[in-house]
Image (cartoon, coloured by chain):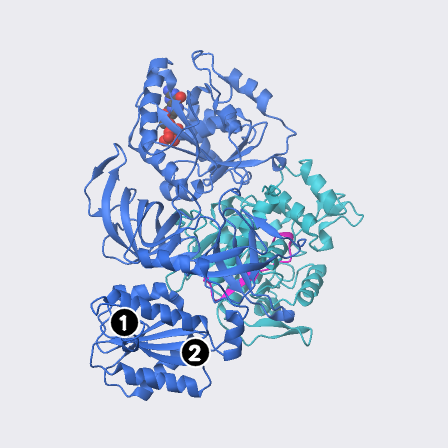
Amino acid sequence: MENLIDKAKKLFGGETMNIDLMPKMNIVVVGHVDHGKSTLVGRLLADTDSLPQGKLDQVKADCQRNAKPFEYAFLLDALKDERAQGITIDTARCFFKSKKRQYIIIDAPGHIEFLKNMVSGAARAEAALLLIDAKEGIRENSKRHGYLLSMLGIKQITVCVNKMDLVSYSEEVFNQIEKDYRAFLQQIGVVPEQFIPIAAFHGDNMVLKSDKMPWYKGPSILEMLDQFKKAQPPENQVFRMPVQSIYKFTADGDDRRIIAGKVETGKISAGDDVIFLPSNKRCKVKTIEGFNIPAQKSVAAGHSTGVTLTEELYLQRGDIMCKLDETLPQVSSLLQVKLFWMNKRPLVMGKEYKLKIGTAKVSVYVKKINHVLDASNLNSAQKTQVERHDVAELVLETKTPVAFDLTGDIEATGRFVIVDEYDISGGGIITSMIRDEQADVRDQVVLREQKWDFSIVDRGARAKKYGHQPKFILLTGKVGVDKKTIAKEIEKDLFESGCKTYFLGIGNLLRGLDVDLDKKARGEHIRRMGEVAHIWMDAGLIVVATASNLNDEELRMLQEVVSRDQVMIVNVGKNEFRQGLVDVQLEANAPAAESVKKIRALLTEQKVFAV
Amino acid sequence: MSTKEMNHLDKLEAQSVYILREAYANFKSLVMLWSIGKDSTVLLWLARKAFFSHVPFPLVHIDTNYKIPEMIQYRDRLALEYKLNMVYGQNTEALKNKQTYPDGTIDRLSCCKNLKTDALKNTLAGTWPRWRMDHNLKKYVPDEDKEPYTGVIVGARADEEGSRSKERYFSPRDKYSDWDVGDQPPELWNQFKTDFAPGTHIRIHPLLDWTELDIWEYIERESIPVVPLYFDQGKGERYRSLGCYPCTFPVKSTAKNIKEIIAELKTGKFKNIAERSGRAQDKEDGGLETLRKQGYM
Ligand SMILES: Nc1nc2c(ncn2[C@@H]2O[C@H](COP(=O)(O)OP(=O)(O)O)[C@@H](O)[C@H]2O)c(=O)[nH]1
């Protein structure tokens, strides 16, 4: 054994090598408890000469003195206490190097919050080693961890079948484990790079090829690691940039209005037509901005950047900027997902959580638990909640629609986390889109936006001239509560203060635009009212409309037809809408003047008059 | 349609900028600590990258009164040039009563606690006076604003020192600035902890993935101005890490400029010498870990 170490040191060690210079790669080591994670890590550190001088001998001597067998886990523990060498190792990360690069092992195993740390680290890990004990075979966490790696999107996975010495270095045992575990991985869509038979404790097939398993022709662990590739940002996919913020810093006469974000995939150039989803706003890129860089015409995946647009659109953090002529993301309030849960409090139905995807953050509920997977056999268990460390397939329902891609298409916009109260508690990937009730309307609206022929007079210019943004104020409530009086008073009030505004009662359409419609075609009446309002809003007006007895879905449809952030929903009388849908609640018999004041205040708060 | 591949500095920059923007989007009362050293100066530069030459939050400096004078001159020069919202705080009591290591009888660690940790805590909390650069008068005036700063951006790097590598990019501290190393929130897919119980403070670490060499290479690439103390002025020594003059010592080096520093780091000259080894307080019993538990950055 010592011989092997010396040999390895000669090959891979190098007193003068400066690790700072080498390319780095983050890796994670996972597997069932006692299958040899610490041993593998300790051995890699030892065999690549990455340990402080004399440390290994010292720990071995300590063990001998206390008459206990040496374990690499002790070595790792001892390193944790090593204060002077604090830069080399600690519980969170340790380093070793090959000739090719430096490896950073994220989270040395054995930590209590292992899963949380593994997930945090592994999210940045570029490759994984998964250990299976040859004697014990595939165990629960062998599968659970494999499943997690697949969800985390770690593509480069090598399976190490450890403790081959305990099965007499048997090729049959190795082949059987490979066959079984491959079959499992296939079910979850993972293709491992390699299976390697090792005896971590003895150093077989770790750094050097072992002569004990001549039947194995593949690479050693370190050789395998060196074959892993550094990922480059995916530039050859369609363009996606979740909007992080809209900046307008006016200091020093800066008048740029910059849409900032990180390009997750694809590439964008000045002059490109773009659309923001889910809010459905279309525009053109004017410039690509940056600080202390040469002027650039385009920017590609991986860069944190910013663009200005040809028009001053009202935009918000959370939208995804996409290219109009490319495949667009999905938009829905229903998502079919796979999720893992990390919180001690289980994930339950009926409770409001927050979903964070890209830069968007919306309220979300579990609509349906399809099944909770028993990670040990991938059988589904019928459960009504998802417990810590469970993996589940669910349907989520968001309060407002979100834009996303399926993870299979674009990773960055296809995965999310769930926040329970204050904590990130679960992570997941979107496996398919479920059409919600507004899907048809939404499709039609996207098409409308794509084909809309804009005038030279742009929306920003109109808003500046009129002194306000367009807005759709919709008053609803039961028949008999006096919505119209209030609506007309608002119109008058706005008009008198110089706004371009117009009152629209849904009844006004019945004998004109809607004359071809059956009286019972409620949905279509409402949709047409939305389309009329949309045209007026494109013309820059504040439209004040009334319609009785609307329900949740009808309001949502109007939000789709007219952009959601431009709709203000005012309910008069008893509020029976889903929580959060109504922006202003008015009492049925409140004096009109008071109601007008309330609505005005909200318009001001929403910066409708700030142009 | 392939564009130039991103090199490691491009990637580090993009990630740090992303983190800074997330911090700015999620925290109202946000500040950045600026120690005048190379790391937090790179951080300041990255903020200008993130916000297109602007720095939309205050920069806070804790003035121990024992900083090497060039550091303060440099701070104020950049503050004026970049039009920074520059704020400093100080433990005036301890200085007045000579409860310091250089002028008093107390040890180095207690001095650090007085002049840095306590000053920092109270400056952030708004319980002690702050001074703000008045750009018209070009000098500091007492700051009216007493609001606590609850989000603090710091330039800590994971490679710098052991205890720092357990950090997350977004790392919460409770009311008492305590730091629960064992129970750090998960951070995945660039989703950070941005929801907090009232009273929680948050430290944000955009430089966690950078190394000392990355810092210098970036300074060179971007031509970021740094304090000349980092260079050998002909005496065959330079500072590798900057602090208070009574407790910070130069290292033997003849590196006269950034290029030479990079070359020197690349030879592996300091391979086995911790970067902060010129900082005397780290060596005292308990050292940096104790300080950090108390809220030192
Ligand atoms: N015989 C044998 N034992 C091993 C080998 N690798 C690890 N072990 C032992 O398996 C036990 C568990 O290993 P450890 O690395 O602590 O597992 P972990 O829980 O996955 O970190 C320890 O007693 C190790 O010495 C090996 O290659 N051969």
Tell which chain the image draws in blue: A
Give the residue furthest to the right: B234
Label 2: how many Cα within 10 Å (few below 14, some 14–19, many 20+): few
Residue B231 appears left or right of B30: right
Which residue in the structure is indicated by mark 1? A515
Which residue in the structure is indicated by mark 2? A604
In the structure shown, which secondary structural element does the residue marked by tag 2 occupy?
Answer: helix
The answer to which of A374 and B97 lies nearer the viewer is A374
Number of numbered discs: 2
Q: Amino acid at mark 2?
A: Thr
Mark 1 or 2, nearer chain start: 1
Instruction: Give the image quadrant in which the ligand numbered 1 is located.
Output: top left
Image: magenta residue range = B26-39
Give the residue furthest to the front: A516
In which quarter of the view is residue A160 placed?
top left
| Colour in which chain B is drawn | cyan
- Can the viewer see residue B252? no
